[in-house]
Image: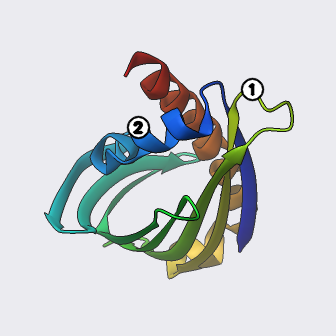
Amino acid sequence: MNFTYHVDVQSSVEETWRKLQDTLAMVHCIPGVEEAEESAPGHFDVKIMTKLGPIALRFKGSADLVVDEADQVMEATVSMSDSRSGNVYGKFRMKLGPNAAGEGSVLQIDADVVIAGKLGELAQPLIKRKADQIVREFSQNLTNYLQAA
């Protein structure tokens, strides 16, 4: 499944990029993150709790992050599993740039996600709605983080 989102940010590209360098703070902007630890440079161990409809899911896994300073791009490869429901694998690309008005910035998020196991078989109709919800919450959390820092 492929998704593309645009997150408008009120701060300049330079200011936003500087704040995004605190990757652990950014990871904690993701809804449902219970634990996140950078166990090696660019490698994060993560635990996430979320709900998909009435089903509670507890994912445990990792993410490898590569940062391209020159192009202001972050790319993450994620592998998560829930012992009862299945696995989620994904590649996420976030590119920061100026917004159309030139007064703030926009973070473009591109995701390519594979959902395997029972979760993938049974929950396909709910996945897009859940992805939209997560990005809306992430956007609000990121905005709050950027304005507070």
Image quadrant holding the C terminus, namely top left
Query: Gap in Å between the C-alphas at discs 1 and 2?
Result: 17 Å
The residue identified by callout 1 is 103
Q: Earlier in the sequence, mark 1 or mark 2?
A: 2
Provide residue 123's location: percent of width, then percent of height.
64, 65
Provide residue 45's location: percent of width, then percent of height.
22, 64
Foreground residue, 119 or 36?
A: 36
| Left or right for 116, reference 40 | right
**Image point (59%, 26%), residue name:** 11
**Image point (75%, 26%), residue name:** 103
**Image point (54%, 39%), residue name:** 14
Foreground residue, 142 or 20?
A: 20
- Which residue type carries mark 1? Glu
**Image point (61%, 31%), residue name:** 12
- Which residue type carries mark 2? Lys
Task: State the mark number for residue 19.
Answer: 2
